[in-house]
Image (cartoon, helix red, strand yellow):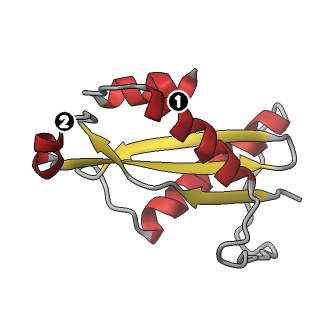
């Protein structure tokens, strides 16, 4: 059994500055998508710009496929074909009462990002998330 939990974070501005004149000039948002695998207690955060893709079901499915494929490849030396007719249980948390690992991870990311006064590139966001 593979237990995954996933969610999008709030959007982050690019560039991130503390100047109020720049608030209305922001044209690009950074999207963060976190997937937590409870089986191995591992989280992965995907990041992309709104100019690269939209936050839609196709994007979520590509992240899911990537994580499932990666998990099964690392669990054995041989490739295991993924069966999509497997039983899937989808649980929706109660709004406002979520204590999910994704929310905890986003809180850690948000704290690191808020400490930075200025962020001008997606690479700077990625470096913060990796640290």
Asked if the residues shown at circle 1 and circle 2 are in contact, with their CB atoms under 8 angstroms apart, the answer is no
| In this picture, residue 130 sits left or right of residue 39 | left
- Seen at 44% across and 42% down, the residue is 47
Residue 84 visible:
yes
Q: Is residue 84 or residue 7 the one in the foreground?
A: 7
| In this picture, residue 119 sits left or right of residue 91 | left
Q: Position of residue 52 (x, y in %)?
A: 27, 49
Find disc 2 in the rendering and name its residue.
19
- Seen at 29% across and 44% down, the residue is 13
- Seen at 70% across and 69% down, the residue is 84
Look at the picture and state if 128 lies above or below 21. Answer: above
Q: Position of residue 6 (x, y in %)?
A: 64, 58
| In this picture, residue 122 sits left or right of residue 28 | right
Dot 1 or dot 2, earlier in sequence: 2
What quarter of the picture does the C terminus occupy? top right
Residue 68 visible:
no
| In this picture, residue 26 sits left or right of residue 6 | left
Estimate how packed mark 2 is, as few (under 14), some (14 to 19) or many (20 or more) residues with alpha carbons within 10 Å.
few
**Could you tell me which secondary element the residue under label 1 belongs to?**
helix
Marks 1 and 2: which is nearer the front? 2
Find disc 1 in the rendering and name its residue.
112
């Amino acid at each position: 059994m593979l237990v995954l939990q996933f969610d999008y974070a709030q959007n982050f501005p690019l560039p991130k500055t503390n100047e109020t004149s720049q608030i209305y000039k922001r044209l690009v948002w950074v999207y963060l998508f976190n997937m937590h695998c409870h089986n191995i207690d591992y989280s992965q955060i995907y990041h992309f710009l709104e100019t690269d893709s939209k936050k839609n079901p196709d994007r979520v499915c590509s992240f899911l496929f990537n994580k499932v494929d990666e998990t099964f490849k690392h669990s054995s030396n041989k490739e295991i074909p993924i069966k999509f007719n497997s039983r899937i249980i989808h649980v929706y948390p109660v709004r406002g009462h979520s204590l999910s690992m994704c929310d905890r991870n986003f809180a850690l990311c948000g704290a690191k990002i808020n400490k930075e006064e200025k962020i001008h590139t997606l690479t700077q966001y990625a470096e913060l998330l990796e640290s």
